[in-house]
Amino acid sequence: MEGQLRKLRTLLLLTLSCWMTLAFAAREPASAEATQATQAAPKAASQAALDRTGKTRKGKASYYGHKFYKKKMADGTPMNPQSNAAASKTLPLGTKARVTNLENGSSEVVEIRDRGPYVGDRIVDVSPKTADKLGLKKDGTAPVAVTPTEVPQADGSVKPGAAASKR
């Protein structure tokens, strides 16, 4: 009798184990789909907020501080202080734009490769090299106009921006 009870317990544990494995396996795809949907929603929302119009925007510019050197930017490349890299919250990555210092008239072409700035009314962060050329290193910020020349579109095409005719 004890032998039969042991076999019955083993069979019950084996059956329960199989049932649990199947139950968890059946839940995983639904869980993964829910996770993907949750992750896709913010991405879709942030892409919907991107400005692909190519219109000029005005606001304040600042520049990357030393602590950001060599850190990865949103496009996956390390921040190079000698590059023409810039950050924008609203322009798509890969956008090329002319940034003009409205106080002194100097301008430089940058490529949007990162997200930010996340401070107040700032609309663009530029590399230290670009900040030198724009003359905004002394005060740290300056009023600027950001005029896109090339704006990547959601379908993969590139739209000429407002500055395209002014090159």
Image (cartoon, helix red, strand yellow):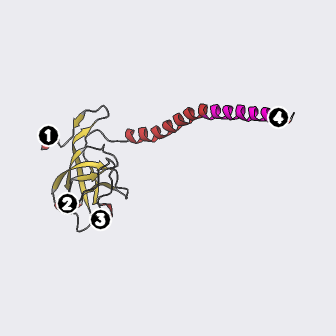
Q: Position of residue 68 (x, y in %)?
A: 32, 60
| Distance from the alpha carbon under mark 1 to that under mark 2 | 26 Å
The numbered dot on residue 129 is 2
Q: Which residue is mark 3?
A: 66
Provide the residue span drawn in magenta.
Answer: 5-24
Mark in front: 1 vs 2: 2
Determine contact: label 1, label 3, CB under 8 Å: no
Left or right relative to 59: residue 3: right
* The C terminus lies in quadrant: top left
Mark in front: 4 vs 1: 4
Q: Secondary structure at mark 2?
A: helix
Q: Which residue is mark 4?
A: 3
Q: Which residue is mark 1?
A: 165
Residue at position x 25%, y 58% in the image: 143
Left or right relative to 144: residue 116: right
Q: Position of residue 62 (x, y in %)?
A: 28, 60
Q: Earlier in the sequence, mark 4 or mark 2?
A: 4
